[in-house]
Image: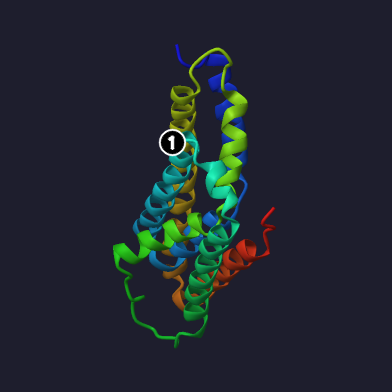
Amino acid sequence: MLVEPEILLAFAIASAALIAVPGPNVAVITATGVAHGRGAALTVVAGSTLAQAAQIALVTGGLAALLAAFGWALGLIKWAGVAYLAWLGLSALLSAPHTGQVKPISSGRLFATGAATALANPKTLIFHAAFLPLFVEPGQPAGPQLMVLGAIYLVIALALDSLYAVLSGWAKAALARFDVQTIARRGSGVLMLCAAGWLALRRAD
């Protein structure tokens, strides 16, 4: 067996505890769900999960150390994502109030928002490079173990992020009954700006 069951259980518990702490991804997922519903939030989750999968694939392939050496490139990715989220937040806050239905957003844009949020936090690449090897058993090939651990992490992240998406979609439905869609949209804008600020203030080291 690639990884012992006890190690897998410890890894799953640690991963769930880390992922459950709200961060920029959760802020964006929740903002989208409140403003546009469960389906839109789940599309954001899909984009975020794919971006995280790419980061874990880089770690598994041994490229994390190489990319970490190019701090300027990671900085560009971070600030591009921060600017994008800030633009989304300001657009939501400054949009004219209206009593009609919220204008739908394309699936491509939602997917890109999720991916941009994850990629704007390249520090997670270094985190995975430090966290995953802690559960690798010595004496066994590291590559296959990292692949298994990475897959488990992604499944847990997908499940918890999807839960946030479903709950925020439910909140949108509840708010709609009271005809406060403008408030919901403004609230989503604030969450987007909080996510941008969270990423902007994270230390690079």
User: Compared to 47, does 81 lie above or below?
Assistant: below
Question: Would you say residue 174 is visible in this rendering?
Answer: no
User: Compared to 54, does 192 lie above or below?
Assistant: below
Q: Position of residue 134 (x, y in %)?
A: 62, 27
Tell me the quarter of the image containing the N terminus. Answer: top left
Q: Position of residue 85 (x, y in %)?
A: 51, 69
Q: Residue at x 49, y 28 (%)?
A: 146
Question: Would you say residue 107 is visible in this rendering?
Answer: yes
User: Compared to 182, does 133 lie above or below?
Assistant: above
Q: Residue at x 53, y 42 (%)?
A: 64
Q: How many marks?
A: 1
Check disc 1 and give the amino acid type.
Val
Q: From the viewer's side, name the closer residue of 109 and 191.
A: 109
Q: Residue at x 57, y 58 (%)?
A: 24
Q: Position of residue 163 (x, y in %)?
A: 47, 46
- Characterize the local packing of mark 1: few (<14), some (14-19) or many (20 or more) Cα atoms within 10 angstroms: some
Q: From the viewer's side, name the closer residue of 157 and 166.
A: 157
Secondary structure of residue under mark 1 = helix
Q: From the viewer's side, name the closer residue of 150 and 73.
A: 73
Q: From the viewer's side, name the closer residue of 182 and 63.
A: 63
Q: Is residue 52 left or right of residue 135?
A: left
Q: Residue at x 53, y 65 (%)?
A: 76
Q: Is residue 37 left or right of residue 126?
A: left
Tell me which corner region of the image, top left, top right, bottom left or bottom right, holds residue 191: bottom right
Reading the image, the residue beneath label 1 is: 155
Q: Is residue 98 left or right of residue 183?
A: left
Question: Please, which colouring scheme is shown?
Answer: rainbow
Q: Position of residue 161 (x, y in %)?
A: 48, 47
